[in-house]
Image (cartoon, rainbow, N blue to C red):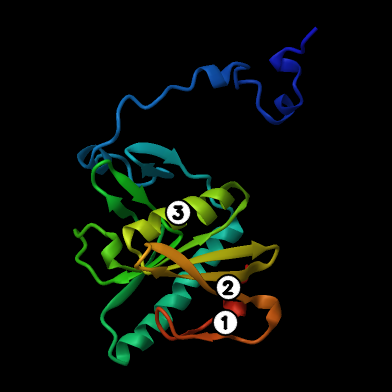
Amino acid sequence: MSPSPRDLPWRAFYPETVPDDWFRTLSSQPHPLTVEEYALLPDDLLIEVVDGYVVHRPANGRRHQTVARRLADLLEKHAREAMARGYGCLTVANAADVRLRDVPLHVRRPDVVLFRCLDDDHVLRPDDVVLAVEIVEAGTETTDTCGKPSEYGRAGILYYWIVRLDRTGASAVERYHLDQATMTYKHIGTLMRDAGGAPEIGMPIPMIIDWPELQD
């Protein structure tokens, strides 16, 4: 005799209020979101939009949030130094909407974005983005290492970083640069915390990766 849903081991991790047939109650989105409909959604939803359809993002853990904030601070410090040496105006944000396409609507929220200064009402688009960064966790491995690099590359974002975490914070930064002939990313190096030192890089802006600043 087959076990009932109530007898399955995973039930131990769910409250009694979760129905056994929860998977049967999931409803599909009635139609692709438009730009106008997306603008009406609350800002605090943990979602992205792929080809008009909502994709729910997993809630980031505390270490993920800490590293994202500290990486944004580090990028902002070096962006200001770059601007003082003649670079154009640059700014940094965490989880900002980047509209890759209007129709069908395609919106991603990189964990950290370095972009050219814009007016507050200006939609952030790939041409404005200098660097997009995703911090990989267990639930985002495939999307961050396969899906998003393809999407960001085709949209024309010049630089993409994948940040790896361990129990203490950022352990590695994989760096990619867009090959504009193929609109795909080429790996240009991986920085490893365990290699020691504070590596200096020149692109997309000159900066030093200060590993202690990226720890939990």
Q: Distance between the residues labelled 1 and 2?
A: 7 Å
Viewport quadrant of the C terminus:
bottom right
> Taking 88 as reference, is 1 above or below it?
above
| Label 3 SS | helix
Query: Of discs 3 and 1, which sits in the foreground?
Result: 3
Give the amino acid at mark 2. Answer: Leu
Give the amino acid at mark 1. Answer: Asp
Name the N-terminal-most of marks 3 and 2: 3
Among the 4 quarters of the image, the one containing residue 85: bottom left
Residue to which mark 2 is pinned:
214
* Residue neighbourhood size for the residue with mark 2, other residues' Cα within 10 Å, grouped as few (<14), some (14–19), many (≥20): many
Residue to which mark 1 is pinned:
210
> Taking 53 as reference, is 78 above or below it?
below
Q: Which residue is drawn at 77% across and 13% down?
A: 3
> Taking 3 as reference, is 44 above or below it?
below
Q: Which mark is residue 168?
A: none
Q: Foreground: 52 or 185?
A: 185
Q: Are marks 1 and 2 in contact (CB under 8 Å)?
A: yes
Residue to which mark 3 is pinned:
148
Q: Position of residue 134 (x, y in %)?
A: 49, 60
Q: Residue furthest front?
A: 181
Query: Of discs 3 and 2, which sits in the foreground?
Result: 3
Q: Where is residue 31 in the image (x, y as percent from the top left)?
A: 30, 28
Q: Are marks 3 and 1 in contact (CB under 8 Å)?
A: no
Q: Which residue lies furthest to the right in this view?
A: 1
Give the amino acid at mark 3. Answer: Lys
Q: How far apart are marks 3 and 2 (CA)?
A: 23 Å
Q: Residue at x 43, y 81 (%)?
A: 203
Among the 4 quarters of the image, the one containing residue 27: top left
In the picture provided, is 166 more to the left or to the right than 208? right
Among the 4 quarters of the image, the one containing residue 114: bottom left
